[in-house]
Amino acid sequence: MKLYADRPLRLLFQVLADALAVVWIFAWVRAGLALYDALNALAAPGRLMTDAGDGLTANMTDAAELVREVPLAGDSLAAPFTSVGEAGTSLSEAGTLFQQNVADLAMTLALLTTAVPVLLVLVTWLPARLRWARRAGGAARLRSLPEGSGDRLLALRALASVSPARLAAVHPDPVGAWQSGDPAVVRGLADLELRRSGLSARHR
């Protein structure tokens, strides 16, 4: 697999495209994190509710224990404090639930904000880059073979994939010339395939 082209112009486009893809992904990840932090700040009232409920429950429980020590009427006197303590528990639970709901919403929206744009670039840019890398890597391996066999295989790839107009520019009958083993035509077709893949021609 070959990551970048040999030819300067195509190399420049590839580097720019890769850099833009990385910047795009980084920017949307940062946006998702920023949104998560902003939405999580909305959970502050829930934390206040939880703290207030916990404090109320603790104070009322302590008060109820003290009142129970009153002879004869202790349990009756403690009942209102116990009820208020239970209300504090409900308030604390409501605050905890509010915080959890805000956290779930923050996570969901942050993930959607990040995932959709990132997936968009990954399904468009990444497959194209991988296809080119595999094709160019195969062409580079063929280029490294001994000139006769490597050029014939590159020329065959050109015959199968390059437009007829570009093939005709090499020879009026490129298939017949390739079959007959015309060295000039084979080299021309091989160079055509290398250029199509963004690679430099074999040094001859």
Image (cartoon, helix red, strand yellow):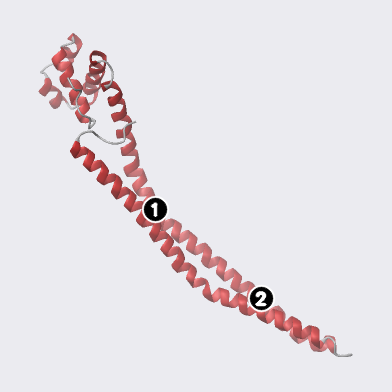
Q: Where residue 90 sits in the image (x, y, percent)?
A: 66, 75
Q: Earlier in the sequence, mark 1 or mark 2?
A: 2
C-beta proximity under 8 Å, tags 1 and 2: no
Q: Is residue 171 above or below residue 12?
A: above
Q: Provide the secondary structure element on which disc 2 rests.
A: helix
The amino acid marked with disc number 2 is Ser
| Residue reaching furthest to the top | 180
Distance of label 1 from label 2 (alpha carbons):
39 Å
Q: Where residue 196 sits in the image (x, y, percent)?
A: 21, 30
Q: Where residue 198 sits in the image (x, y, percent)?
A: 22, 32
Q: Provide the secondary structure element on which disc 1 rests.
A: helix
Tell me: 152 left or right of 67. Answer: left
Q: Is residue 2 above or below residue 33?
A: above
The quadrant of the image that shows the C terminus is top left
Residue at 48% from the left image edge and 59% from the top image edge: 108
Q: Nearer the viewer, residue 30 or 124?
A: 30
Which class describes the residues within 10 Å of circle 1: few (<14), some (14-19), or many (20+)?
few
| Residue reaching furthest to the front | 203
Q: Is residue 136 above or below residue 105?
A: above
Residue tagged 2: 90
| Residue reaching furthest to the right | 72
Which class describes the residues within 10 Å of circle 2: few (<14), some (14-19), or many (20+)?
some
Tell me: 90 left or right of 74. Answer: left
Locate residue 12: give its quadrant: top left
Locate residue 166: give its quadrant: top left
Residue 116, numbered circle: 1
The quadrant of the image that shows the N terminus is top left
Residue at 76% from the left image edge and 86% from the top image edge: 63
The amino acid marked with disc number 1 is Val
Tell me: 14 left or right of 113. Answer: left
